[in-house]
Image (cartoon, rainbow, N blue to C red):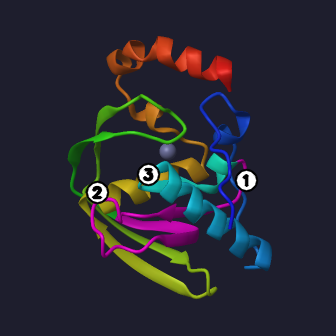
Amino acid sequence: MAIRPIVKYGSAVLREMSRPVGEITSEIKDLVADMTATLKEAGGLGLAAAQVGVSLRIFIVDLSALDISAEPKAFINPEILETSGATEYEEGCLSFPGIYQLLTRPDHVRVRALGLDGKEFVEEADGIYARAILHEYDHLDGVLFIDHFSTVSRALVDRKLKKLAKSA
Ligand SMILES: [Zn+2]
């Protein structure tokens, strides 16, 4: 298990459409183990493979910072089946250090994905869990949380974004 560097805004991989995972090989298992360790070290709630520079449809959600009984969970080739409700919450992203924004997202999500064991599962999530899933799912399609900002909020962080992109 190794900590991998987290790719920051400005890196092209964050805008790529990630490819589906074919077989769950030992490389995929290693990647997921590394992503889980990287996410824990960074203290975030979620991490997509693109954020460690790998353009594959995998993300991890780990809510143990909020709920000590929570276990990190890997979602491979996920598919959003349904969303409902709407809620506003302050959101951040490990690829955008220092940028936080109140964003409205659905309050409930139903998602289907493969687990590390290769078996399909369906997960129902609410609140912050739903938000983390939707945020990470966006990464698989090259969509970033700043894309959900209003024009005004986007203008307010414009200088920070340019600085980030420059150092990427
Ligand atoms: Zn993110």
The mark found on residue 43 in the picture is: 3
State the extent of the magenta-drawn residues as a range: 53-82
Magenta stretch encompasses residue 6: no
First in sequence: mark 3 vs mark 1? 3
| Residue 18 x, y percent position in the rendering | 69, 53
Label 1 Cα crowd, 10 Å radius (few <14 / some 14-19 / many 20+): some
Tag 2 and tag 1, C-beta contact below 8 Å: no
| Residue 15 x, y percent position in the rendering | 65, 38
Residue 31 visible in rendering: yes
Label 2 Cα crowd, 10 Å radius (few <14 / some 14-19 / many 20+): some
Q: Is residue 75 left or right of residue 23?
A: left
| Residue 118 x, y percent position in the rendering | 64, 85
Q: Is residue 114 above or below residue 6?
A: below
| Residue 78 x, y percent position in the rendering | 54, 68
Tag 2 and tag 3, C-beta contact below 8 Å: no
Q: Nearer the viewer, residue 89 or 122?
A: 89
Residue shown at 27%/67% (left/top)?
67
Q: Secondary structure at mark 2?
A: helix
Numbered disc in front, either 2 or 3: 3
Q: Is residue 144 left or right of residue 85?
A: right
Residue 21 visible in rendering: no
Mark 3: which amino acid? Gly
Q: Nearer the viewer, residue 28 or 76?
A: 28
